[in-house]
Image: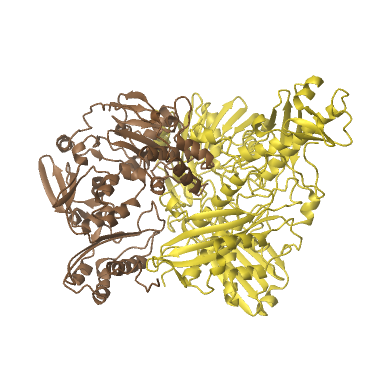
Chain colours: A brown, B yellow
Amino acid sequence: MNITFLLNGETVELADADATTTLLDWLREERGLKGTKEGCNEGDCGACTVMVSDENGSRALNACILFLPQLNGKSLRTVEGIAAPDGRLHPVQQAMIDDHGSQCGFCTPGFIVSMATAHRNGARDFDDQLAGNLCRCTGYAPIIRATRSAADQPVPDWITDAPVTATANRFMPDSSDALAKLYEANPDATLVAGATDVGLWVTKGLRDIDPVIFLAGCSDLKQVSIDDETLRFGAMADMNTVRAAIADLHPSYAEMIRRYGSVQVRNAATIGGNIANGSPIGDNPPALIALGATLHLRKGDQRRDLPLEAFFLDYGKQDRRPGEFVEAVSFSRQTDRLKCYKISKRFDQDISAVCGCFNITVADGVVSEARIAFGGMAGIPKRATSVENALIGKPWSDDTVDTARAGFDEDFAPLSDMRASATYRLETARALLSRYFAEDRGVAGSVLEVQP
Amino acid sequence: MPDTLQTPAGHVRLGSNSGQPMTRRDGIAKVTGTATYAADNRPDRLAHAVFASAGIARGRVVSLNVEAAKSHPEVIEVITPDNRPALHLDPDGKSHPFSWRIEALQDNTVRYAGQPIALVVAETLEAATEGARLLAPEYDTDPARIGFENGEAYDPPAVGIGGNPSFSKGDFDTGFSNSEHRIGASVDTPAQYHNAMEPHAIVAEWSGDHLTIDTPNQAIHLARGAFAGYFGIPPENVTLRSPFIGGGFGSKAILVGPQILAIMAARMVDRPVKLVLRRDQMFGPVQHRGATRQKLRIGTDGNGLIKALEHEATASTSSFDDFIEGAGNASLNMYASPAIVARHSAVRVDTGTPGPMRAPGEASGSAALEIAIDKAAEAVGMDPLEFRLRNYAETDPASGKPFSAKSLRECYELAAQKFGWSDRPLAPGQMRDENGMLVGWGMGSALFPAPMFAAQARATLRRDGTALVETSGADMGQGAWTALAQIAADGVGLPVDRIEFMSGTTDQPDAGVAGGSGHTASAGGALFEAGSNAVQKLADLATADPESPLFGAGNTGVEAREGRLFRADDESRSESYADILERAGLERIDAMGSGGRDPANTEARAMFSHGAVFAEVKIDPDLFQIRVSRLIGAFAAGRIINPHLAKSQLTGGMIWGIGFALHEEGIHDLRSGRPLNADLAGYHVPVNADAPHVEALLVDEDDPYVNALGIKGVGEIGITGSVGAIANAVWHATGKRISSYPIHIDALLS
C-alpha cells in the first residue's frame, strides 16, 4: 500500500508498505528511531505509545499493534518529536525529571508521549490518561505528580503539525458503500478497524491475514447519531467516542468503558470490532444486550438487522456471512435503568471475571421489563432469561429478588479458570442482582447493613 | 585528608554532595528517548536471532524442520544441538556460586516449557521469527511435573546463594508445648516472574578473539569473566556495556542461556547478532521467584512473649538446578525467642530454574511470618503493634550478636503515628467506609540484610580542576548514575558538576554486584576511598612543597572542599587542586580505592535495615474485590545518600508488596506444564489504579559499623513487611486468614 504521513514534522511517503508491518517494528528496525520501546508487543504495557493526530485531534496509540497503513493521512509524533527541534524540553519532560518520574527509564518514552498527548488535549483525568502505561519501578505516584504539575503550562507550538492528505489505495475504502462492494468481491479479506485484536493475530499468532481491508477511511462508519428515538453507533466508532456519547445517558456503561482497556486501546478499539470478533468476555455485548440493541449487518447492497444476542451463536462463532460486515449497532432511547458491573481481580486493564449488566424497569412497583446479560459466564455473551422471567410481572421486592436469584443456576454453568472459580462467578451473579436492587432502593453500596 | 575526619567508630564524614535530594543526572536522556538500552544498538551488518521455545515441559525434541526454516530467503543460519559449536565450559556446570545451569542447545532434552530448543538467525527480526515458526518441532513427551504435589522432593544442601538450609537454637518442642498460646499458620506463595519492563536483550559482536556485548547486566565484571569462560577467551577480551538497565530486580544479575546463544550465533555467522526476548519468553529461561509452601508455629506465654518459633519452608526449583527460596530464614533475625527453628525442603518441578528476585527469601518468608505473628497476637488478645514491641529483638535472635544499628522502634512509632494506628479496633470486621466497604488495618515488620561486595574504583584529579571518577556501576533504575556520583564527588572534594562519572561498562574498575541492596555501599565505598586516596596524594605534594601555602601542614592535616585544600588549623591558607598540579607539572594524579567492611565488625555485629509497614484495605462485602487504599512505611537504613532516590526505591518496593499480596502469580497448566499467563495481560503487575496512597518515611540512623560510609541498602526492604501487612489488613476487614498468595477474589467466599 502507498501511504503518506508526517513523522515528527517530516513527510514520509512509503510505496508498497506491507499491510501488517507494525509501526513499532518500522520505527525501530527500519527508521532507526529507538526511543519508542517494545515491552510486550501486544498493547498491554504502553512502552511504545505514540501520538497520532488528524482533523479529529490527537490520540495516544500503541505502536506495537498499529499497522503502517493505519497512519495514512495522519501526523505521528514519537518520543523523539516531543522536545523542540532545538532541544527545549516539553513541559511534561521537565516535570518528569523534576518529580523523579523516571527510574529505570524503559517505560519513560511511552509515558512521556501519553503525557504530552493528554497535555495537548487539555485532559485533567490524569489517572485515566496514564492507565495504559505500566511501570515496574516507581509505583506511579511521581509520574502522576509530574503530569499534574505540567498541566497548566501552555502547549508548545512545535507539537502541532500541518494536516496531511492520505494517499488513495484500493484496499482502503473511503465509505461504507465502497467497503460493501470491495468486501463482497473479496470475502476472504481481513477487515482491520483499530487492530487491537487483529494486531495480535499477527504479532502473537504469526498469522498471514492478507488481503487486508483497512476501514479507517470510512468516515461514515464512525458516525454516532442520537435522536429522540434511537442511539446509533457506526461500527467504526472508537470506544472513547462511545464512552463520551453515552456518558450522560447511561453513566454506568460509560464508567465500565473507563476501565475497559486503556486510553491507547480505547482510542483504537471500535465498537463494531468488539462485537464482530465475538469474544466471550468482551465487555460491550452484555451492556448492549441489556439495552436491547439491534445489530445492523451489510453485505453488498443487502442489509439485515438482528437482536445483538442472536449474533453470538457459539464460542468463537458469530452469525456473519462471507462478505458481510457490521455496519452499526443501535438501541432505543430509554430511561436509564442500566447498571454495569465489571468484576476483575486487578482494577484496571483486566479481563473481566464476570461482567454483569442489568436493565430492569419497574412500573407501579411491579417489574415490567427485565434484560440481564452477562459476559464471562458462558462461551458467549448471554442473557439470564430464567432470572428475567422470575422478575417480570412480580413486585420489585426483596422476596422477588431472593427468589429470582436461584435462576442464575439455570441460566449459567460457568467454568472455573484462573480469573475466578465457577462458585465465585455464580455467587457474584446472585450478589449483583441483590446489589442492583439495593442501589435502586437507595441503600448505599452494599446489601449488608451499613452503619452511617 | 579530604573532609573525611574519622569518627571514633571509623565512620567518615561525607561532603556537601551526599545527602542532597538531587534529581537524576540521566533524567534528560530518559525523557527524550536518547538513553540507549541494549536492544537499541544497531551495529552495521546486524543480524537478528530468535530462539524457538519448547512447547512441552519435559521430554525430547525428536524433529525440527530445519530445511523449511533455511528455505526462507532471509534466514542465514539455524542452530540446533546437531550443529551447535562446542563451548569451552559445560553449560550444565557451575563454575561459581553465581552461575546457573543454562540451556545452550547442549542436547535435545526439554526441561521446561519455553526452553530454547533452536536458534534462527536472519536478516530481519520478522524473518527470524518466521524461521523459528517454520521449525515446527515434534517431541517425545514425558508427563510434566508441576506443583508441590507432583514434583520430586529432596533436602537441599543450601538455600539462596550458599545460605544455611536449617537452623535451630533452644528447645522448640518444650518451649512450644509449655506455651500458653499456640498458633500455626500455613501459607503458600506462587511462582512470580520479575518482568522488568525491559525484556532481556543482547547484541553480540566478535572482532577476531575480542567480544563486544551490549546486554543489561547487574554485575558487569562477574559477567565478563563468565562470558569469557564459556568462549575460552581471556576476560580482558570481553567488552561488556550496560549503561542503562530497564529494570533488573535480580533477573539480570546472572547469565542466561539466550545470551550465550546469541554470542555463539555471532561467531558462527561472523556478524553482529541481536537477540531480544519476547515477553512470553520472560517466563522460562530468565529465572523467577520460586513457589513456596510454608508452615509456622509460634508459642507464647500469657504475657505475649514468644517462647518458641518454628518456620518450615518447602520451595520449588527446577529439575536440573537448585535455587531454594530461603523463606524460613526470614524468622531468624526479627523477633526475640528463646527457641527458634528454621528448616527447608525442596521440590523439583518442570519449570525454569528460579533465581533471586527482589528480596529473595525475605519477601516470601516475611509474607508468611507476619501472618503468623498477627495470629499469635490475636491468640493473646493483644494489639499487633504492641505484640511486636513486646517481642522486640534487642540483639540478633539467631546469633545473639548486637546489631550494628537498629532503629525499628523508631520506625514503628513514626509509621504508626502517621497512619493513625492507635484508633484501630482490636477485633476484625468492625470498620466500614462511607460506601459500605469493609475496612481493615494491618501491619508488618520489614527487614533486609546489609551485605557488601568487593568493589574497586579509580579517581583522577585533572589540572583543569575537574575529576574523572570511574567504577563499573549498574543503574537499573535505582539511581546509581546519581547516588554514586554524589559519593564520588565528596570523595574528591568537588561539586558534582565538576566530576566526570564513568560507569556501566567493563572499561571501568569492578564495581561488584548491583544486588542484595549492597551496591551503593560497595561501589560507593570504593569511589569514596579512591577519591580520598587521590586527594591524599595531592596533599602530599602540596605539604612537601615550600612554595605551597600548605607547606608543612603534614602534621595538622588538610581538608578538601570545592576543589581546594585547606589547612585544617588555618582556613585562610588554601590552594586549588589545579594550582598544585600546575606547579608540580602534572596533568593529572590518580588513585584506586576499594569498598568493603572491617572484618572485625562483620564478626562482631549483625547488620540489617529495618522498617515497619501499615496497610489499609477496602473490601467489597459481596464481591470481595480487594483494594489497598493506604500503605505507609517507615524505614531505617543507615545513611541516606539521596532521599529522593531512597524514597523511590522504598515506595517501589512497597508497590511490589501489593503485587505480591494481590496480583502476581505465574500459573502453569498442570497437564502440559506450559505457562498459562505468559504476558502482561495475564500476569498482573500493579497498574496505576491499583497503586494507592503509598508513603515511605525515612528514619535517621547512624550506623558506625556497617561500613565506612554508614550506608545500608533500600532496594529490597520495601517489599518485606508490606505483603504481610496487606494480608493482616484483609483479616482485620473480614476476619478471614488467608493461606495463599496472591489473595484471590474468591478466597474470601465463605
Percent coordinates x, y for residue A375 in the rendering: 29, 58
Q: Can you name the residue that lies furthest to the front here?
A: B572
- Where residue B280 appears, as percent x and y from the top left, is 44, 46
> Can residue B95 be seen in the rendering of this structure?
no
Q: Is residue B572 above or below residue A351?
A: above
Residue drawn at point x = 69 percent, y = 27 percent: B466
Residue B122, picture quadrant: top left
Marks counted in the figure total 0
Horizontal side, residue B487 vs residue B604: left or right: left
**B421 vs B24, nearest the viewer:** B421
Tell me which corner region of the image, top left, top right, bottom left or bottom right, holds residue A115: top left
> Residue at image x 16%, y 43%?
A324
Q: Quadrant where the C terminus of chain B lies?
A: bottom left
Residue nearest the observer in this picture, A168 or A130: A130
Give A241 or A159, whichever is nearer the viewer: A159
* Residue A395 as seen in the image, left or right of residue B5: left
Up/down of B666 relative to A387, above or below: above
Is residue A401 depicted above or below B90 in this figure?
below
Q: Quadrant of the N terminus of chain B?
A: top right
Residue B214 horizontal/vertical position (percent): 56, 33
Residue shown at the point (48%, 46%) measured from the top left: A145
For residue B68, above or below residue B93 = above
The image position of residue B80, as x and y in percent, is 49, 38
